[in-house]
Image (cartoon, rainbow, N blue to C red):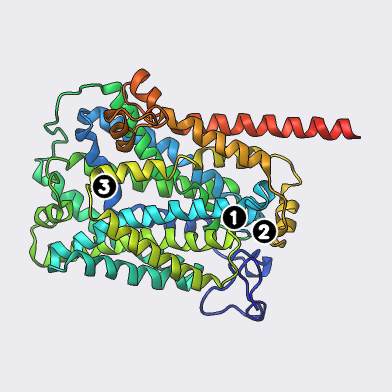
């Protein structure tokens, strides 16, 4: 029998080969692992060509090398704070993100689950294209088959569950890192150890700087809503400071490395197929093929983490199927989305989807942090997690705050979609980047605006609720 949070009661007696626990709290007796294990998982998940591709965007935005360098470091230094903070809540309750979110959003957690799953699937689809390109460059495998091979392996890992996923990521942290070390050396040698590259003269450095910082921020910050999923098996006594640092450094260092690698190699990776450029850069042949295999494995490691969370997020929407079944279904959806993204301009598609699919995470994190301030939140989360989502009341304060945060941040956004609407004179153009284009030169301040608006609106809603309760007494 499978209950509302995806746990089969008959399988709780002993640890199964495949994880079936879903959103159920992890019993204290089953807690295990070290905080640095979580850091290793996050480090491995960022060693992916899609992160390298973000660095290549620097010159395309008209930034000089060192301006882009600073934007990348700043974006990741701030972006990694979100998942690092969120990660510390996993060991407290042994609950995944969506199970804990029920205490804040109530019945509306179902909507949050769908939204979060879409974000995870978007990350998977954007990265899988690069995995297919790596196999094509090394072995001539066509794009469709290459994408299919990415999803076959990552589906096996993510469907198996937490323990298999952690072991896989632990190995990939070394294997994929070795491949990228070779690529880094090849790039430095090709540039005669000089980071200076020819880039277009900056046209609007302030706006472009903010935009690149926002894009790199979003790549790191976008993991925030997944973070507790990978720390909930840790012992409750785990140091929150150590867990914060492990997550922060795992994500931050890997993202900065990948993106600076892309920035430094921007002129070398120019073209329709950056993976083919890397294959050529490393000399092709057997060595190039080995490097392409590590790139493929990096994509799989990244996708497996996102897909595991996507399965939990669909369970959070109230689906009553077993976790492995839901995770496999998500793999099919991500596969189809990848085929769609692969049919267009990847550069514009990548940045637009990355930004629009993660803006909501900013007010979500702000609401989460403010909502967890009461000391009673721990017991409330455990109690509410056991109640079917359909029986909960809607957490209107959190819903209104999240909606306000997302809507009000959009005029401060900068996406290709918004620019296209502005070019056609669409009345919706102001909503998508109107303030960005007219006042900050195309810079993107959607994330900080989303956090501030989400926190302020949630605080006001809760204050009004408490005032109404006091009047009724």
Which quarter of the picture shows residue 426? top left
Q: Is residue 208 above or below residue 117?
A: above
Residue 440 in the image, given as x and y percentages of width and height: 36, 20
Q: Which residue is mark 2?
A: 389
Helix, strand or loop at disc 2?
A: helix
Q: Nearer the viewer, mark 2 or mark 3?
A: 2
The dot on residue 110 is 1
Where, by quadrant of the figure, is residue 4 drawn? bottom right
Disc 2 from disc 3: Cα separation: 40 Å
Q: Are marks 2 and 1 in contact (CB under 8 Å)?
A: yes
Q: On the image, numbered disc 3 is attached to which residue?
A: 52
Quick check: marks 2 and 3 in contact, CB under 8 Å? no
Residue closest to the eye, 366 or 331: 331
The reply to whether residue 46 is visible in this rendering is yes
**Are there few (<14), some (14-19), or many (20+) residues within 10 Å of tag 3?**
many
Q: Position of residue 162 (x, y in %)?
A: 50, 67
The residue lying at 44 percent from left, 51 percent from top is: 119
Point out the image quarter for the N terminus.
bottom right
């Amino acid at each position: 029998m499978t209950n509302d949070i995806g746990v089969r009661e008959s399988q709780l007696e002993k640890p199964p080969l495949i994880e079936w626990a879903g959103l159920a709290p992890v019993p204290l007796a089953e807690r295990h692992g070290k905080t640095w294990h979580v850091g290793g998982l996050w480090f491995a998940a960022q060693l992916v060509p899609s992160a390298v591709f973000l660095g290549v965007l620097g010159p395309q935005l008209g930034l000089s090398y060192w301006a882009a360098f600073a934007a990348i470091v700043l974006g990741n230094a701030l972006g990694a704070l979100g998942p690092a903070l969120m990660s510390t809540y996993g060991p407290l309750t042994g609950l995944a993100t969506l199970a804990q979110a029920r205490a804040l959003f109530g019945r509306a957690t179902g909507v949050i689950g769908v939204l979060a799953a879409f974000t995870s699937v978007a990350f998977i689809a954007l990265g899988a294209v690069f995995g297919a390109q790596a196999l094509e460059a090394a072995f001539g495998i066509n794009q469709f088959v290459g994408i299919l091979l990415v999803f076959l392996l990552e589906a096996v890992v993510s469907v198996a569950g937490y323990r298999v996923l952690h072991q896989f990521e632990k190995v990939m942290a070394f294997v994929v890192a070795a491949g990228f070390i070779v690529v880094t050396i090849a790039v430095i040698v090709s540039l005669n150890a000089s980071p200076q590259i020819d880039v277009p003269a900056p046209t609007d450095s302030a706006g472009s700087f903010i935009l690149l910082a926002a894009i790199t921020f979003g790549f790191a910050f976008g993991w925030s809503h997944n973070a507790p999923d990978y720390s909930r098996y840790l012992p409750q006594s785990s140091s929150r400071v150590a867990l914060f640092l492990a997550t922060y450094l795992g994500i931050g260092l890997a993202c900065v490395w990948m993106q600076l690698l892309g920035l430094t190699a921007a002129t070398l990776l120019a073209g329709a197929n950056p993976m083919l450029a890397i294959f050529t850069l490393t000399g092709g042949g057997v060595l190039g093929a080995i490097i392409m295999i590590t790139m493929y494995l990096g994509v799989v490691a990244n996708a497996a983490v996102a897909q595991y969370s996507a399965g939990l997020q669909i369970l959070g929407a109230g689906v009553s199927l077993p976790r492995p079944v839901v995770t496999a279904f998500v793999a099919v959806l991500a596969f189809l989305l990848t085929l769609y993204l692969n049919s267009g301009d990847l550069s514009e598609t990548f940045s637009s989807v990355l930004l629009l699919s993660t803006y909501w995470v900013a007010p979500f994190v702000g609401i989460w942090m403010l909502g967890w301030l009461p000391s009673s939140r721990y017991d409330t989360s455990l109690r509410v997690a056991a109640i079917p989502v359909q029986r909960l009341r809607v957490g209107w304060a959190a819903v209104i705050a999240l909606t306000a945060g997302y809507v009000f941040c959009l005029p401060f956004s900068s996406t290709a979609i918004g620019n296209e609407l502005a070019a056609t004179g669409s009345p919706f153009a102001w909503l998508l980047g109107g303030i960005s284009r007219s006042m900050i030169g195309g810079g993107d301040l959607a994330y900080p605006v989303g956090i501030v608006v989400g926190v302020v609106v949630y605080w006001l809603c809760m204050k009004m609720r408490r005032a109404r309760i006091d009047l009724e007494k």
